[in-house]
């Protein structure tokens, strides 16, 4: 039974690892060949457009292959040591965790990047307002900010300026920015600039309104998180603080009562 379970689990894991390894090796030999189909859509859904370039997807598949190979060896050892239901379940959990861990890590990186851009955009709008009021164009203000800072938002501004320098229109470059980072702040910023480009309103006024709205939205977010803090403290208080308090306060009285009986 132990040998059969080990062979079956090891064979299935080795087959999966071999297929992933062949795909990775094939892709690395021909890096220009895109990853197509449902596999690419699944990986892009986790990594996003910025981290979902062809090279990053190749690295993601390679990391997944190595982790699955290690989990396969560990799973075979676990099944060999304990061939009951618990051993099979543990081996299966290791295999699933190794398969999903690179995707979870990529998804976490994308969430961190978008949150950083959302927070940084408030300060960036303030600097851009001063630059535009001083006579700079939007591209010059974005270039000034991108030159002075090394951050995810500065990288996005550099990407927009690179596209404009290649002959792409400002409207299309901003649309690509929105596709890469579809957060609420970026959506409002891109919509305001594109609308300003169509109607010809003063750009400094539009950016100042966007900065005011962004600051108000950040203040509301902080107030919302502060309001949730009281509810989050209920569980640590009930399950951690109160039991210790009851032991300290009620414990001695209870001991004296039992001793007196």
Image (cartoon, grey):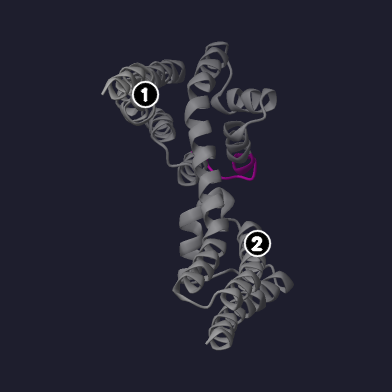
**Which residue occupies the extreme left position in the image?**
261
At a point 43% along the width and 15% down the height, the residue shown is: 208
Q: Is residue 46 visible?
A: yes
Residue 250: percent from left, percent from top: 31, 19
C-alpha gap between disc 1 and disc 2? 50 Å
Frontmost residue, 42 versus 188? 42
Frontmost residue, 163 versus 35? 35
Helix, strand or loop under label 2: helix
Give the answer, above or below, for where 115 lies relative to 148: below
Residue 197: percent from left, percent from top: 43, 31
Helix, strand or loop under label 1: helix
Neighbor class of circle 2 (other Cα within 10 Å; few <14, some 14-19, many 20+) is: some
Frontmost residue, 243 versus 41? 243
Q: Which mark is residue 247?
A: 1
Q: Is residue 212 toward the left or the right of residue 92 in the image? A: left
168 is within the stretch colored magenta: yes
- Where does the C terminus fall, quadrant-wise? top left
**Which residue occupies the extreme right position in the image?**
29
Q: Is residue 13 toward the left or the right of residue 241 in the image? A: right
Give the answer, above or below, for where 3 lies relative to 130: below
234 is within the stretch colored magenta: no
Neighbor class of circle 1 (other Cα within 10 Å; few <14, some 14-19, many 20+) is: few
Q: Is residue 253 toward the left or the right of residue 98 in the image? A: left
Q: Which residues are magenta?
A: 162-170
């Amino acid at each position: 039974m132990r040998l059969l379970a080990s062979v079956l689990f090891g064979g299935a894991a080795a087959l999966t690892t071999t297929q992933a390894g062949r795909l990775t090796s094939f892709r690395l030999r021909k890096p220009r060949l895109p990853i197509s189909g449902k596999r690419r859509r699944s990986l892009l859904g986790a990594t996003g457009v910025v981290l979902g370039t062809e090279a990053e997807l190749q690295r993601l598949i390679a990391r997944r292959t190595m982790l699955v190979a290690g989990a396969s060896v560990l799973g075979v050892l676990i099944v060999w040591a304990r061939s009951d239901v618990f051993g099979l379940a543990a081996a299966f959990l290791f295999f699933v965790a190794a398969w999903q861990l690179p995707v979870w890590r990529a998804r976490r990186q994308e969430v961190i990047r978008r949150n950083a851009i959302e927070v940084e955009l408030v300060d960036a709008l303030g600097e851009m307002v001063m630059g535009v009021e001083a006579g700079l164009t939007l591209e010059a203000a974005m270039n000034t900010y991108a030159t002075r800072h090394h951050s995810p938002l500065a990288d996005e501004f550099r990407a927009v300026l690179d596209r404009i320098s290649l002959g792409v229109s400002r409207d299309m470059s901003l649309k690509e920015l929105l596709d890469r980072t579809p957060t609420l702040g970026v959506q409002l910023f891109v919509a305001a600039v594109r609308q300003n480009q169509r109607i010809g309103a003063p750009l400094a006024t539009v950016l100042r309104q966007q900065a005011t709205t962004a600051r108000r939205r950040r203040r509301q977010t902080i107030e919302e998180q502060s309001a949730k803090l009281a509810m989050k403290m209920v569980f640590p208080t009930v399950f951690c603080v109160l039991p210790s308090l009851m032991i300290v306060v009620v414990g001695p009285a209870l001991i004296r009562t039992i001793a007196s009986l």
